[in-house]
């Protein structure tokens, strides 16, 4: 039974359970609501929750674990002979899955009876042609062991599906019965319902932790695989980035240094654009601007933060890049590439202006007025007050804002994908195309990915490096803000 | 004593006064002016950049909403239809039928002896026969006799939009200057015209060689499905998390850990979420590539911190007196939260959710990693089954088009960005209006 039907069934039964529970409670109180411990609807919720929650949890776990279990079983059944020299077990398994899905499609479209799909043999039928006729294209001829495994795969999944449906619905029924039997006018339904809800709230709040754990583990695991195939010293200290394309053979070189150089160079240019502009904009808005000016300028600058990065990327690609090439780089003989460190850096700088300005604005506003008044009273001009009193007082916060902007710059992807180029180079000329960590993650992971080749796995090592760098910057920013923040009362 | 000091000072006039500035004061005042000008200039740069950015996108992209069409009469008899459907090269047969219409139209415009029919057919898009076939397949009454509006070739379209010139056509293998002159004649005769391009919003991506037939239909559906998944998951989970952290959680290490995690997730680069999606949802859990379901899950994880932060802020802004009053009347803690605090915080939560969705709608990088860069020719089916069909999303479609070699796709990409920005604008305005309408000051 499709999962969506099971979900619908659970929902419908929960609603029925609600009314059952409530009416039983009312009946046990003899129709007098006052003698119930809780409001009648709580008895209903009690029944509905006991039906839905355990069965949904079981369903979720089952859906996660079933493919893994089937995979292992079928993979174990495959004879070693079916895996020839030049492929791996996982590739053969993907063939098996594909054939199994093809058989499903064929049965769905009526091109094959269910019986036929279960029993066809490669000796008698050209399976590839039969499946091709219903629109399932297979890469190679179907071998007998693969077809066999695919048939077992189908069989096993359909049995497991039936078992799952039965178990989930049975668990739901059991939950309903349990709560129904317990329902009585003295039963503390509200307390039970509230603790179940509280449990669900706690469960939801752990998702944040699960996400972080998922990020770290998925990357750690694949990075470890990568380092079993490639020396970590060469990765972190290599100066050549030259992956060979998978399938062509040859040795790949994965040196992190050129990527890191490109990332840091672009971030540096971006920050040298964003920090002065953002900081001065923040100072002007919080210190000089009239309320009307402020109410106009602040939202306009913040719009820059709401524009998707792909828009900046396209802006770099079609406007800024050609402009820099035609009017600066080529006349000065610095290069003829429209994607360059300067292009990406400038555009990223524009993107980062609001990050610097709105955070700094808040921080400057938090500096107490008394400090300014004191400075004015001693005869300082407004700008002297800002430079010598306000900025020093707000400095930890401003440094924090700049660090956060740096972490944005390092992790930014679309602007550099479209604006910076793809050549991994160690160069000082800002009008050369260079590349970054994020660009290489995208280029290694888009298209066909093979989780056994270092060409794919290196992206996880890059991702982990990126994650550690940005996390470090964020933690540092938080630390600086907390440690050096002046407390004014 | 005071007399003595007064007399000891020399009788020279003071070096400066409020009325006459000395050099130092002048310098300080000039510095003050400069400083203020820097600030104003910084804001000016920011605003100018925004204007340049928007006008660059608009100037490049607005033309994609208009398209050059050729209007031709087409007649198909049932026999011709069946013959075409039975043949191997179906579109070839339909092309013949279009050619017949074109010859007829050229004859009535008295152009037939001026032009070679092959040149004239070259003005049509490669998509035209396929479009005619779709119309024929859904036709009921034979013979089919109708005026059809066929897409013109991308180069011809570019000519009318000023992108393709005679010099370019000189060097182009796919169009000749003669053909451009011919299309000018056709336009003068009223056979070819540039009009609003509905197909840009509804068609599928088509093929990399037919920019004129590329549309945003699949991207729309993909983005819509993903937003549905994000809304269905991120809103309940985010609100539940915030309620727990704000109203129930004891102050201990566990809740500290959760809070630190949430603020860190808000700052993790988006591409890392893509890696997570690829490794966990696709590689480990075996969900299909390029599916809106996977994209939605990844975007949910990205949007959660935004929603949680907004929800917590709006829960915090509900005054404690409301909670105290409810508790004092005998409501349980849970009833207090769900019956009183949550409804009062709802506008703030809604605003935060819309802003989170707008962020998710514009996100590109993680979607590239979960395989959304494939060319998708078919619309995904209706949900829930459609959630697992391959699709693209609006920002990803922009990226795909920028990677194509035909310059006509740059126009398409800019057009897609205009659509994307329009959606974001609507969502943000909705959020602002909601906040204005329902915001309560306690």
Image (tube, coloured by chain):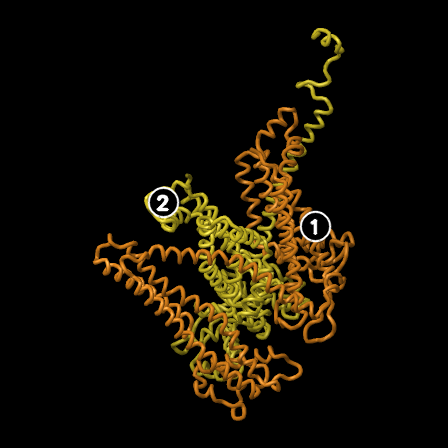
Chain colours: A orange, B yellow
- Residue at 60%, 43% in the rendered image: A482
Tally the marks: 2
Q: Nearer the viewer, residue A153 or A427?
A: A153
Q: Secondary structure at mark 2?
A: helix
Q: Chain of mark 2?
A: B
Evaluate whether label 2 is on the same chain as label 1.
Answer: no
Q: Nearer the viewer, residue A198 or A152?
A: A198
Q: Is residue B292 above or below residue A478?
A: below
Residue A373 position by quadrant: top right
* Residue A410: x %, y % from top left: 65, 54
The crowd level at tag 1 (other Cα within 10 Å; few <14, some 14-19, many 20+) is some
Name the outermost residue toward the right. A333
Q: Secondary structure at mark 1?
A: helix
Q: Which mark is residue B414?
A: none
Would residue A80 be visible to someone looking at this image?
Answer: yes
Name the outermost residue toward the bottom. A124
Q: Chain of mark 1?
A: A
* Image quadrant containing the C terminus of chain A: top right
Q: Is residue B10 above or below residue A298?
A: above
Which residue in the structure is indicated by mark 1? A268
* Residue B290: x %, y % from top left: 54, 68
Q: Which mark is residue B327?
A: 2
Q: Is residue B187 above or below residue A264?
A: below
In the shown orientation, is residue A269 left or right of residue A154? Answer: right
- Residue at 55%, 69% in the rendered image: B282
Task: Judge depth for marks 2 and 1 and give the one in front.
Answer: 2
């Amino acid at each position: 039974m499709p999962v969506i039907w099971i979900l619908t069934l659970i929902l419908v039964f929960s609603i029925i359970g609600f009314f059952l529970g409530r009416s039983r409670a009312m009946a046990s109180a003899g129709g007098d609501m006052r003698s119930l411990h809780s409001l009648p609807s709580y008895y209903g919720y009690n029944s509905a929750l006991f039906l839905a929650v355990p069965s949904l949890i079981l369903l979720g776990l089952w859906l996660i674990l079933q493919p893994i279990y089937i995979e292992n079983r079928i993979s174990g059944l495959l004879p070693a002979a079916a895996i020839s020299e030049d492929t791996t077990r996982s590739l053969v398994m993907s063939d098996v899955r594909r054939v199994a899905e093809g058989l499903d499609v064929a049965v769905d479209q009526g091109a094959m009876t269910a019986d036929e799909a279960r029993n066809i043999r490669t000796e008698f039928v050209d399976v590839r042609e039969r499946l091709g006729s219903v629109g399932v294209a297979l890469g190679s001829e179907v071998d007998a062991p693969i077809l066999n495994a695919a048939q077992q795969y189908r069989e096993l999944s359909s049995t497991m599906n039936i078992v799952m449906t039965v178990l989930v619905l049975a668990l739901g029924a059991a939950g309903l019965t349990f709560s129904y039997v317990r329902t009585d006018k003295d039963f503390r339904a509200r307390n039970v319902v509230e603790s179940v809800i509280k449990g669900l709230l706690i469960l939801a709040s752990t998702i944040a932790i699960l996400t972080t754990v998922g990020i770290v583990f998925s990357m750690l695991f694949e990075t470890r695989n990568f380092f079993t195939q490639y020396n970590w010293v060469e990765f972190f200290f290599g100066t050549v980035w030259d992956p060979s394309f998978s399938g062509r053979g040859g040795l790949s070189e994965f040196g992190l240094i050129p990527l890191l150089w490109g990332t840091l160079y672009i971030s540096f240019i971006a920050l040298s654009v964003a920090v002065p502009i953002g900081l001065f904009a923040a100072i002007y808005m919080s210190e000089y601007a009239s309320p009307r000016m402020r109410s106009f300028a602040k939202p306009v600058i913040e719009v820059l933060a709401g524009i998707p990065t792909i828009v900046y990327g396209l802006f770099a690609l079609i406007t800024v890049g050609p402009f820099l090439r035609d009017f600066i780089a080529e006349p000065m003989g610095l290069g003829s590439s429209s994607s360059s460190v300067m292009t990406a850096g400038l555009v990223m700088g524009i993107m980062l202006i609001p990050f610097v300005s709105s955070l700094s604005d808040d921080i400057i506003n938090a500096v107490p007025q008394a400090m300014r008044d004191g400075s004015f009273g001693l005869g300082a001009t407004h700008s002297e007050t800002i430079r010598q009193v306000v900025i020093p007082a707000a400095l930890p916060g401003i440094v924090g804002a700049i660090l956060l902007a740096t972490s944005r710059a390092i992790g930014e992807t679309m602007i550099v994908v479209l604006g910076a180029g793809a050549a991994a180079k160690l160069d000082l000329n800002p009008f050369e195309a260079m590349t970054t960590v994020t660009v290489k993650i995208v280029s290694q992971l888009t298209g066909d990915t093979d989780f056994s080749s270092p060409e794919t796995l290196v992206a996880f090592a890059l991702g982990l490096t990126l994650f550690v760098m940005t996390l470090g910057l964020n933690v540092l920013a938080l630390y600086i803000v907390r440690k050096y923040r002046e407390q004014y009362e | 004593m005071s007399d003595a000091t007064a007399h000891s000072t020399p009788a020279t006039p003071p070096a400066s006064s409020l009325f006459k500035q000395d050099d130092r004061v002048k310098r300080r005042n000039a510095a003050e002016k400069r400083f203020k000008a820097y600030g104003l200039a910084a804001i000016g740069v920011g605003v100018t950049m925004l204007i340049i950015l928007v006008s660059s996108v608009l100037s490049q992209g607005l033309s994609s909403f208009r398209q050059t069409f050729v209007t031709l009469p087409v007649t198909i008899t049932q026999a011709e239809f069946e013959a075409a459907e039975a043949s191997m090269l179906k579109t070839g047969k339909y092309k013949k039928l279009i050619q017949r219409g074109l010859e007829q139209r050229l004859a009535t415009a008295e152009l037939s002896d001026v032009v070679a029919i092959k040149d004239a057919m070259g003005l049509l898009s490669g998509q035209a026969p396929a479009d005619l076939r779709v119309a024929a397949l859904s036709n009921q009454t034979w013979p089919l006799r109708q005026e059809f509006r066929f897409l013109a070739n991308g180069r011809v379209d570019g000519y009318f939009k000023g992108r393709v010139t005679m010099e370019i056509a000189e060097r182009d293998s796919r169009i000749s200057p003669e053909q451009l002159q011919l299309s000018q004649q056709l336009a003068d005769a009223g056979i070819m015209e540039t009009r609003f391009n509905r197909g840009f919003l509804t068609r599928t991506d088509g093929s990399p060689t037919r920019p004129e037939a590329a549309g945003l239909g699949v991207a729309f559906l993909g983005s819509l499905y993903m937003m549905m998944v994000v809304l269905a998951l991120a809103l309940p989970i985010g609100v539940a998390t915030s309620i727990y952290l704000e109203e129930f959680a004891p102050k201990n290490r566990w809740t500290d850990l959760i809070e630190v995690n949430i603020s860190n997730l808000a700052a993790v680069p988006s591409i890392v979420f893509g890696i997570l999606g690829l490794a966990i949802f696709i590689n480990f859990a075996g969900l299909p590539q390029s599916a809106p379901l996977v994209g939605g899950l990844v975007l949910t994880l990205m949007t959660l911190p935004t929603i949680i932060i907004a929800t917590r802020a709006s829960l915090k802004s509900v005054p404690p007196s409301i909670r105290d009053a409810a508790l004092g009347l005998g409501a349980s803690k849970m009833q207090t939260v769900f019956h009183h605090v949550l409804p009062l915080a709802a506008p703030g939560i809604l605003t935060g959710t819309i802003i989170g969705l707008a962020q998710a709608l514009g996100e590109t990088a993680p979607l590239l990693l979960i395989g959304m860069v494939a060319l998708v020719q078919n619309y995904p089916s209706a949900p829930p089954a459609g959630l697992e069909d391959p699709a693209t999303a609006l920002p990803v479609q922009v990226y795909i088009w920028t990677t194509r070699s035909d310059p006509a796709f740059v126009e398409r990409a800019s057009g897609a960005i205009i659509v994307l920005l329009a959606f974001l604008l609507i969502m943000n305005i909705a959020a602002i209006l909601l906040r204005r309408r329902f915001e309560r000051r306690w």
